[in-house]
Image: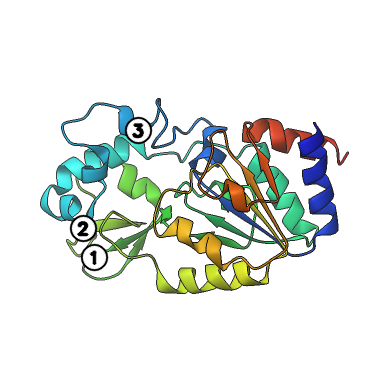
Amino acid sequence: MEKLEKLKELIKESNNIVFFGGAGVSTESGIPDFRSQDGLYHMKYDYPPEEILSHTFFESKTKEFFKFYKDKLNCLDVEPNICHKYLEKLEREGKLKAIITQNIDGLHTKAGSKKVLELHGSIYRNTCESCGKKYDPEIVFDKKTEIPTCSCGGIIKPDVVLYEEPLDEETVSETIQVLRNADLLIVAGTSLTVYPASSFIHYFGGKNLVIINRDDTSFDSMATLVIHDSLGNVFKYLNDSKK
């Protein structure tokens, strides 16, 4: 309770807040994360998920890629949770300047947030590799087709950053900029082990760094405040205490 009150106070006194979130933000909506014991990386497939979600695998075993993608990464019907909703409210109040997310589920945008920097892309954007035509995710997740193809015959690739692929340069540039300008950085629901995303924390030059995560991270010693709790508990407290 003392730590949650401290977080509430830090938010109150800050006017340029940036939120940096990982898979733990979405687990509250029922989406499994990748690295916990009940996450995707511990499920059994013919290939390890890291291999399936690689550029090489997408190119060489496209049918198997889409089988996994449609089965495990379709979260179109998932709804934003209290964390997404609280952040949207904080943005509306003018205090939260940007959300940086490692998630591809689009839930921050679905909750109404405007400034969302999606480091690893989004399932909601899909592009034909041949002609560049854009497609809605429903086309890609349609289980009646093994491989989604464009009217031109090209393969429709989801705009998600696969292993072996670089991050979008414009998104990276914007991420670094908002981190440099922030006075409070809240990092939540991420183990901060995924490179290069985790390295961006070093660009934060503000006064207060808050880390909210179930487990320890390698950045805990740098933080003003560390909270080991579920994001649901933390953001419900913040939301309810503002009423």
When the figure is inspected, residue 200 is found, relative to residue 220, above or below; the finding is below
| Quarter of the image where one finds residue 231 | top right
Q: Disc 2, disc 1: CB below 8 Å?
A: yes
Distance from the alpha carbon under mark 2 to that under mark 1 = 6 Å
- Residue 186 horizontal/vertical position (percent): 65, 52
> 10 Å neighbourhood of mark 3: few (<14), some, or many (≥20)?
some
Q: Nearer the viewer, residue 45 or 78?
A: 45
Residue 233 in picture, x, y percent from top left: 69, 30
Disc 2 designates what residue?
A: 155
Element type at mark 2? loop
**C-alpha distance separating marks 3 and 2:** 25 Å
The amino acid pointed to by label 3 is: Leu
Q: Is residue 227 left or right of residue 8?
A: left
Quadrant of the drawing holding the N terminus: top right
Q: Residues within 10 Å of mark 1 (few under 14, many from 20)?
A: some
Quote the CA–CA distance across marks 1 and 3.
27 Å
| Residue 143 seen in the current view | no
> Which residue is nearer to you in this view: 151 or 173?
173
Check disc 1 and report the residue beneath it.
129
Residue 35 showing in the rendered view: yes
Numbered circle sitting on residue 40: 3
Q: Residues within 10 Å of mark 2 (few under 14, many from 20)?
A: some
